[in-house]
Structure formats: C-alpha cells, structure tokens
Amino acid sequence: MEFLAYTLQQVVNGLQLGAIYALIALGYTMVYGVLRLINFAHGDIFMFGAFIAYYCIAKWQLPLGLVFVVTMASTAALGVLVEKIAYKPLRAAPNISVLITAVGVSLFLEYFLSLKSIFTPNYIAFPRPFDVEAYDLGPVALTNIQIIVFGVTAVSLLLLYLLVYRTKHGRAMRAVSHNRETASLMGINVDGVISFTFAVGTALAGIGGILYGFAYPQINVFMGIMPGIKSFIAAVLGGIGLVHGAVLGGLVIGVSEVFVSAFLSSTLRDGVIFIILILVLLLRPMGFFGKGRDKV
Amino acid sequence: MSFFAGARRFIVCCAIAYVLLKALFLTGLATQYVEQIVLYALVMIIASLGLNVIYGYTGQFSLGHAAFYGIGAYASALLTHVFAIDSVPLFLPVLLVAGLFTAAVGGLIGLPILKLRDDFLAIATLGFGMLVRTLLDNSDRVADLLGGSRGFIGIPRITSLELVFGVMAVLIPVTRNLIFSRYGLFWQCIKDDELASTAFGIDTGRMKSMAFTYGCFLAGVAGGLYAHLYTFLHPSNFDFLKSVDFLIIVIVGGMGSITGTIIAGLLWVGFIEGLRIVLPSGMLELRWVFIPIFLIILMMLRPYGLIHRTESRLLGIGRK
C-alpha cells in the first residue's frame, strides 16, 4: 500500500515536470511545423523567460498577473528577433546550415547572458511570490505549486487550442505547416505566419520558465539546455508538428524522468531519456500520433 | 608499397614539418607550452578529419563526435593502465585497439541512427553524446579507476611529436586514398543526393555506416593520443562544446577537404590558445560569445566553409 502511494506521488511529481516540458515542447513542434526547423535556441529562450520572471518578482516586485504578461512579451520578442536576424536570411539554405545557425544562436544566448554584467553564470535563488502549502488528498499530497502548474498549463493549452483551431491566424498556421508554397499562393503572408508562430511558441516557453522557477526555485543561464533537449524529445515522441502530441510527449517524458530518479538513480535520468529517444526513432519515428506523412 | 609511393609527397611534407618543429623545440625557441598546443592541434586535426569523413564527405550530420573521441581516450587510458604500458612501441597496438573499439561502438550505434534524416540524426547523435557523458560521469560505479566525475588520473604521458607525426603520416594518406577510392565516390554521391544514389544501386545504408565507422575510428585514435598527451581525462572534456569545436574546424576548413581540415585545425587551436594570451583573464569568457556570432555569419556567407572540395597539390593530397 505504501509502495502504491509512493508511486502515485511520483506520478503527480512527474506530471508537474511533464507539464512544463509540454509547454516547451509546443514551441518546438509549432516551429518545426511551419519551418521544418529544430529551433535549438528554444531551451535558452525558456531560460530567458525564467530570468525575466526573476527580475519581475525579485527586483520590480510586480503582481503575479503582470509577471506572466511581461515574461511572455519578452520571450516572444526575443523569439521573433532571433527568427528575423538568424533564421530568415537562411530560408532557402540547406537544413543543416540552419541547424548549425540555431546551435550558434543557442550558444550565443547562453554565453552572452552569462556575462557578469548581465545574468552572471551563478545559480540564483528564485523567489516564490507565495508560500508553499501542501494539501493531503488521501494517498497523495498536492502542493499549491502543483495546482498552479497544472492550472496555468491547462489554461494555456485551451487558449492555444482555440487559437490554432478556431481563428484565422490558426488556420493560416496550419496551412503553412501543410504546404508553405501553396499557402503563399493562396495569399497567406508566410513570413508573417512564421513570425507569429515563433512569438506564440516562445511565449509558451516563457510561461514554462515562470512555472519552472516556481517548482524548482534555482535558476542559471545554462538551465535551458537539458529541459530544451528533453522537450524536443517529447515533441518527437508525440509526433513532431502535432500540438496534442507535444503535450502527451511532455507528460510521458516528465513522468519517466521522475520515475527513474525515484526508483533507479537521479544521475541516470538523463541517460534513460536518450535511450527513449533512440528507441522512439527506431520503432516509431513518426511518434505516437504521427501519420507518417512526414518522413523522419 | 604503392601506398608509400602514392603518399610520398605527404610523408615528405610531414617529415619537413617534423624536423622544423623539432628544431624549434630543441633550440628552446618555442616553450614546452607551445609544444603541448602544437601536439593538441595535430590531435584535433585527426579527430576533425573523422568528422569530415562523416559530415563533410558523406553528409551525415553528427553533433556527438566528441563522444567517440572520449570513448577512444578512456579505452586507451584503461588499456595502458591494465597492461602497464609506458613506451611508444607498445602503445601503438593500444592506439589501434582503442580506435577499433571506438569504430565498433560507432558502427553499432550508427546501424539504427543512420537511417534518420539530417536534423533528426543531429538530435540522435547529440543524445548519444549526452548518454556517453552520463555514463562517463557514473563510470566510477563500475570501476573506481575510471574516476567518474572526479576524472581519470595517472595516465602515463606517451604522446610525443614523433608519435603524432607518425600516426598522421599513415592516417592522412589512408583517408585520402579512401576518399579517392570507389567508396569515397559513393560517400560523396550520398551527400549530394541520397535518393539518386540508391537509384544507381549504391548500398547507401552500408556506405553510410562504413563512413561513420571510419570517422569514429579516427576520433578514437585521436582520443587515445589526447589521453596520453594531457594525462588526465574528465567527462566535461568530451561534452557538447567539444563536438561544436570539431564541427567548427570542419566547417571553417571546408566540408570535404582534407587540406582545409588541416589548415582550420591549426588556425582554430592557435586562435583559441592565442585568445588565452591576448585577452585579459576577465575577458576570456567573451570567447564563446564571439565564436557563435562567427559561426552564424559563416553560415550566412559561406555555408560550405572556406575551402570547399579542393585539395592542396603541394601537400600531395590532391588527385594525381
């Protein structure tokens, strides 16, 4: 019984991590959908979001609602800026050149922001604007952080769903993702759609950054690397280019990571995630929900 | 014997470079620090050549080359420790075994992942690199000797100028001959158009795996030389940034150019070490701010590198 309760508690903890991965994975999957590009710098934009949130809370003491608004606006601005400066000139270039550029952008953001005059390379304690409370729900305990993480993620997903499937912008995004050339012939402003997609994707990464700060209150300029890669793996696991795939993939990766830490060893958790990636690429390269239209 | 006839010119060039460098070091014009850097640059060239075979010639993008370099380094260090080797003649078989072991690992991992298209292959190799890093960090659980995240200490210093030049004088002509052989042509075909290569009847799976295995072999040998040059190994020496180092050398030198790799390797290591001297210690962190900018600009202006598919006749690498 005790073991069952422990396992259930780990599932809850895993879902908390997984929700954050899902938010990051959405950015990967949407950008991949419209541009066929793995935006390597996405994890670093998530890191940027966590830092902006830190400044909002600790330095400027903004109310919680405004923290979300400012952070999302900043990460979206950074995302669009990166797209305009680094990726747009390479629209016609081979895939790998763009990927190498993305690696360059990622390294640049990490090392530029780690300069002493900016964010410094140190670990910084992230201040929670509220006290942690735990609620005992029979076999499992739920903290108010977990409730916030699940709540914010659910609302973001709902809004994203409405945006993608119920608005004109969303329809344009889906059209570009389906076939860029035909979409441009139908009078869709493809460059505008790409910028818009970057803005939405990186704003979600910003939300992820805030929630990560709440849940694991220590931030550092290199904190985006591993969550970034794991979220990408989550996107591949669910079927890259698919919104619901990214969400499911994120939750699965989060729960598996917490399980490995809880039952095996916390130093092995990164290794296991990559074994999952290799297995997925081998056995079902299109992911859970992929139709195989997109050859990997 | 025809191998040596073909590689005559390159071996002579190697010998001249060796005599010049040896003279510099013996007369004390160059310090031991400079010698260490020169040796390191040559080791980097051998490993980068491996990546050039994989990426530059065959077009299989790898972000995990440092992992193979690390496997070679750890394997060779373990072998010299187990057999208590501290002389060059006995070290040569160790180097060969370390290279072959790395090649075997590369071949095995390549079997599944080489089926993937370019950017997914990049993620898979990146993942493999991270996996190797995790395993190396935890290696002390298997054998305390490997040191885990404390690092592998107490490796004898065997790598010398003679050894490095000897290895280069053999491996570079071998690589050149492979590139100009039937197989090399297949590799370059696959890089240009994989679908058309299949249509011509090229066994693309086998050819890609062959190029990958050979590239890993070169990385493994270079890793062995590295381990016995610095006598200390740490998992952080074989992380993602190291893979980016190799990638930069290949891209700067030019994809599909041995000459380019040699020049770029020397320039790159010289540049990095030069910055250490020129920049004041507080500014050293600026290096990794400018390197990515350089990489981004390079991708915009010359996506195939500075020297693309041309070889130096002077060095005797070009087509006869």
Image (spheres, rainbow, N blue to C red):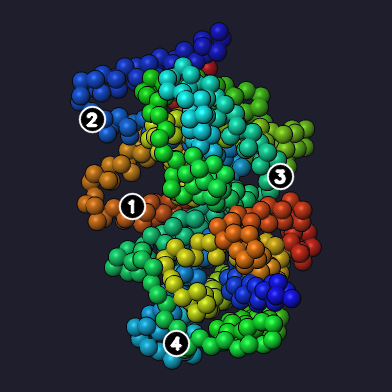
Q: Secondary structure at mark 2?
A: loop
Q: Secondary structure at mark 3?
A: helix
Respond whether the residues carrying marks 3 and 1 are from the same subunit: yes
Q: CA distance from mark 4 to mark 3?
A: 48 Å
Name the subunit of mark 3. B
Name the subunit of mark 2. B
Instruction: Please give the residue where the numbered disc 2 appears in the rendered image.
Output: B31
Q: CA distance from mark 2 to mark 3?
A: 47 Å
Instruction: Please give the residue where the numbered disc 1 appears in the rendered image.
Output: B287
Q: Is residue A180 visible?
A: no
Residue at the spot 40% in from the left edge and 89% down from the top edge = A62
The image shows residue B84 at horizontal and vertical percentages of 47, 25
The kind of residue tagged 2 is: Thr
**Up-down relation of residue A77 to residue B20 (above or below):** below
Graded by Cα atoms within 10 Å as few (under 14), some (14 to 19) or many (20 or more), the crowding at tag 1 reads: some
Q: Are marks 4 and 2 in contact (CB under 8 Å)?
A: no
Q: Quadrant of the C terminus of chain A?
A: bottom right
Q: Quadrant of the N terminus of chain A?
A: bottom right
The kind of residue tagged 3 is: Pro
Name the subunit of mark 1. B
What mark, if any, has residue B112 been given in the picture?
Answer: 3
Name the subunit of mark 4. A
The kind of residue tagged 1 is: Arg
